[in-house]
Image (cartoon, rainbow, N blue to C red):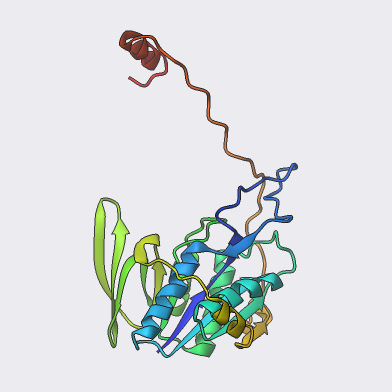
Amino acid sequence: MKVLVPVKRVIDYNVKVRVKADGSGVDLANVKMSMNPFDEISVEQAIRLKEAGQVDEIVVVSIGVKQSQETLRTALAMGADRAILVVATDDVHNDIEPLTVAKILKGIVDEEQPGLVLCGKQAIDNDMNATGQMLAALMGWSQATFASELEITADKAKVTREVDGGLQTIEVTMPTVVTVDLRLNEPRYASLPNIMKAKKKPLDEKTPADYGVEVANRLEIVKTVEPAARAAGIKVASVDELIEKLKEAGAV
């Protein structure tokens, strides 16, 4: 079985994000970029399936700017077999919208014919949480979201997913799209020898036109602002004063 794993280049989760002075977006100048953490988990899960003998080939794909090839090389160093980069924009500030990404991924799925698509449940830069679901709808495939456990058999996938108040276990037919959550696994670090080997692994470069997709933004970012600063607290001398303050604030 072949597995397709979409990965996205985002601001590293350890970096404090800065908003541009004009409020037009996030400042990406001299900012460290990394693979989306949820996508790291999906790559790791694909590798574990291959190590278990359930997967023959892992293909990673990224859609965005040319610099995304660094993200793909990271996935290849982790253990993916080959990569596809779809250069959809030259502007690092242009975030390709989920529907466009899903349409491009559909073209890749039609071409590659994987038995499973593993993707992160969302990207930490826009938190859309939509691409996997849209891809499943376009393909007419089953889908399982927010996976914290995954078992693959010949024609079924059993997925434990996190829901409000507990866990839900579902069974879906293959082929399927699975979006992964944080508790599914702990991604491995790429070793230096594997990083060197990744430079020789195949990386094909494509454009949206190769899949008959036109990149057009349907959303316009009107304004970007930083979260409001937390207000300073106050000290009270007694429980009675605390209750009075809570009443004034409408908390009781």
Screen quadrant of the N terminus: bottom left
- Classify 191 as above or below 16: below
Q: Residue at x 75, y 68 (%)?
A: 90
Left-right relation of 156 to 58: left
Viewer-proximal residue, 183 or 218? Answer: 183
Left-right relation of 119 to 99: left
- Classify 103 as above or below 108: above
Screen quadrant of the C terminus: top left
The spot of residue 115 in percent (x, y) is: 40, 85
Viewer-proximal residue, 28 or 107? Answer: 28
The spot of residue 68 in percent (x, y) is: 65, 71
Q: Residue at x 33, y 13 (%)?
A: 243
Q: Quadrant of residue 195?
A: bottom right
Asked if one can make out residue 140 in the rendered structure from this viewpoint, the answer is no
Q: Residue at x 71, y 69 (%)?
A: 89
The spot of residue 122 in percent (x, y) is: 48, 61
Viewer-proximal residue, 251 or 202? Answer: 202
The spot of residue 232 in percent (x, y) is: 52, 23
Asked if one can make out residue 215 in the rendered structure from this viewpoint, the answer is yes
- Classify 60 as above or below 188: below
- Classify 161 as above or below 2: above
Left-right relation of 120 to 96: left
Q: Quadrant of residue 240?
A: top left
Residue closest to the far front: 192
Left-right relation of 81 to 183: right
Q: Residue at x 35, y 88 (%)?
A: 53
- The number of numbered badges drawn on the structure is 0
